[in-house]
Image (cartoon, rainbow, N blue to C red):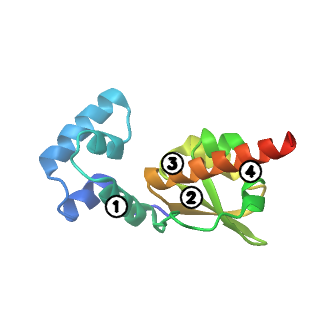
Amino acid sequence: MIRSPKRLGDILIEKGLITQEVLDDALREQRETKEFLGAILLRKKRIKEADLLTALSEQFHIPLFSLKDKYIDWNLVKGFSASLILDYRCFPVAKDDWSITMAITNPLDIRVLKRVEDEAKGLRLKLVLVSEGDINDSIKRYNSYLRGNISKLFE
């Protein structure tokens, strides 16, 4: 993952989404709470999720992606732990002989990235950035898939 030399706050200011005063206030709070800057700005309703995703996409050179109405390859999904999908909130999107594409919501969460890397089993990791809503919808579809398979076991 290539990180831009620009910081998130600078990108948001350049786009006219926040002011320096708003950024300074959020950074003060970040020093106290250790929260992600984007999470603070979202919670305070200073930016919209789409704005944050666009800025993170620019900062980390990760493409934005939508999972809505996308075909889910359940054979691919079964290759990853339920914990990765449900607890770490990542979703496998595609796989080829050399790489796996994984949908994530926060490219700054090192704990999540490490877990994804571990489960990629040596394949090159490609990340796409998705909204919380997309991850939530995919997890609902995943839970329905699991319930359906459990029901089949008892038939």
The residue lying at 78 percent from left, 47 percent from top is 149
Q: Is residue 93 visible?
A: yes
Q: Which residue is mark 3?
A: 136
Element assignment for label 2: strand
Q: Check disc 1: other Cα within 10 Å, few if <14, some if 14-19, many if 20+.
A: many
Q: Which residue is mark 4?
A: 80
Q: Quadrant of the C terminus?
A: top right
Real-space Cα separation, disc 4 to disc 3, in angstroms: 17 Å
Q: Which residue is mark 1?
A: 55
Task: Answer with the quarter of the image where residue 73 lies.
Answer: bottom right
- In percent of width and height, residue 74 lies at 73, 59
Q: Amino acid at mark 4?
A: Phe
- In percent of width and height, residue 107 lies at 49, 53
Real-space Cα separation, disc 2 to disc 3, in angstroms: 12 Å
Q: Earlier in the sequence, mark 2 or mark 3?
A: 2
Q: Is residue 5 above or below residue 19?
A: below
Real-space Cα separation, disc 4 to disc 2, in angstroms: 13 Å
Q: Which residue is mark 2?
A: 103
Between 103 and 3, the residue placed more toward the observer is 103
Element assignment for label 4: loop
Q: Amino acid at mark 2?
A: Ala
Residue 105 horizontal side relative to residue 13, left or right:
right
Q: Amino acid at mark 3?
A: Asn
- In percent of width and height, residue 88 lies at 59, 42
The residue lying at 57 percent from left, 48 percent from top is 140
Q: Earlier in the sequence, mark 3 or mark 1?
A: 1
The residue lying at 27 percent from left, 44 percent from top is 41
Q: Check disc 3: other Cα within 10 Å, few if <14, some if 14-19, many if 20+.
A: few
Q: Amino acid at mark 1?
A: Ala
Q: Earlier in the sequence, mark 4 or mark 1?
A: 1
Q: Check disc 2: other Cα within 10 Å, few if <14, some if 14-19, many if 20+.
A: many
